[in-house]
Amino acid sequence: MPVMTVVVLGFVLGSIGWLATRMRRRRVGGSTMGPFDELWHPAAHRARIEFEVQTQRQEPMPSPDDPPDPGEK
């Protein structure tokens, strides 16, 4: 019985590692692997969240009352 438990646990952990590698290559799966990153590598999780925030950030639109940009033609 203990041998079977070790085999199943090894299979599950190996599958998670394989899934993480595959998703990193395809650059998808942040939401899928997020909980595992948060548990085992908190610094990577925080860096991924910061990266997502910066990619979603947009430059504010200029107000109509703003003076024209001198570098703009």
Image (cartoon, grey):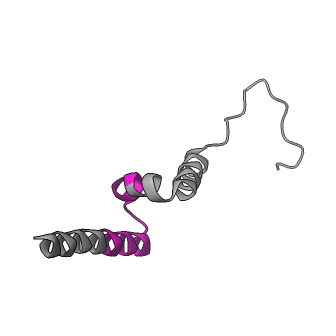
Residue 61 location in percent, x, y? 67, 35
Residue found at x 82% / y 48%: 72
| Residue at left offset 43%, top offset 68% | 27
If the image is split into quadrants, where does the N terminus sit?
bottom left
Front position in the image: 32 or 11: 11
Magenta-span inclusion, residue 69: no
Residue extending farthest to the left is: 1
**Residue 41, x across and y down, in percent:** 50, 59
Q: Quadrant of residue 26?
A: bottom left
* Image height of 34 relative to 26, above or below: above
Which residue range is magenta in the image? Answer: 16-35
Chief SS of the magenta region? helix
Q: Which residue sits at x=21%, y=72%? A: 6
> Residue 1 vs residue 72: left or right?
left
User: Who is closer to the viewer here, 24 or 40?
Assistant: 40
- Whether residue 22 sits left or right of residue 53 in the image: it is left
The image shows residue 21 at horizontal and vertical percentages of 39, 74
Q: Tell me: residue 6, above or below residue 53.
A: below
- Nearest to the observer: residue 39 or residue 33: 39
Residue 64 screen position, x and y as percent: 73, 26
